[in-house]
Image (cartoon, rainbow, N blue to C red):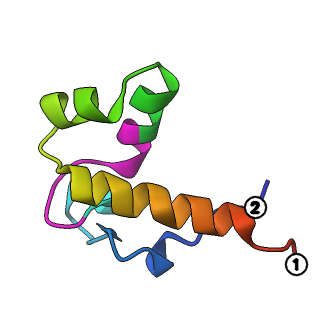
Amino acid sequence: MKTLDWSQCPAVESIPGKVSGAWVLRGTRTPVKVLFENLEAGLSLDELIEQFPVTREQLESLMAFVARSLEKEPA
């Protein structure tokens, strides 16, 4: 499986020294990896919003980026 190029996702950022440079939702310290781990464990978007300092708009933007990435033809 091809790795996503998170630098192309406007909803996330990676800043050296902030959460060890992990990809986080822009303006937060919430790692993208943690969000997906929780989704995989069965949490809904509403539950993520309750448990993390994120908005529905941020999560929808993140999910839209992933969906678009899955639609691309393999190189």
Q: Which mark is residue 46?
A: none
Separation of disc 1 and disc 2 at Cα?
A: 9 Å
Provide the residue designation for mark 1. Answer: 75
Residue reaching furthest to the right: 75
Circles 1 and 2 in contact, beta carbons < 8 Å: yes
Q: Is residue 5 above or below residue 45?
A: below
In magenta stretch: residue 65: no
Looking at the rendering, the stretch of residues picked out in magenta corresponds to 26-35
- Seen at 38% across and 50% down, the residue is 32
Q: Nearer the viewer, residue 22 or 52?
A: 52
Query: For residue 9, which quarter of the picture?
Result: bottom left
Judging from the image, what secondary structure is the residue with disc 2 in?
Answer: loop
Looking at the rendered structure, the secondary structure element under dot 1 is loop
Relative to residue 48, is residue 64 drawn left or right? right
Q: Position of residue 14 (x, y in %)?
A: 32, 69
In the rendered view, tell whether residue 46 sits above or below residue 7. above
| Left or right relative to 6: residue 35 | left
Q: Position of residue 39 (x, y in %)?
A: 44, 30
Give the x, y percent position of residue 60.
35, 56
Query: For mark 2, what is the residue?
Result: 2
**Residue type beneath disc 1:** Ala
Taking the spot 46% from the left edge, 55% from the top edge, the residue there is: 63
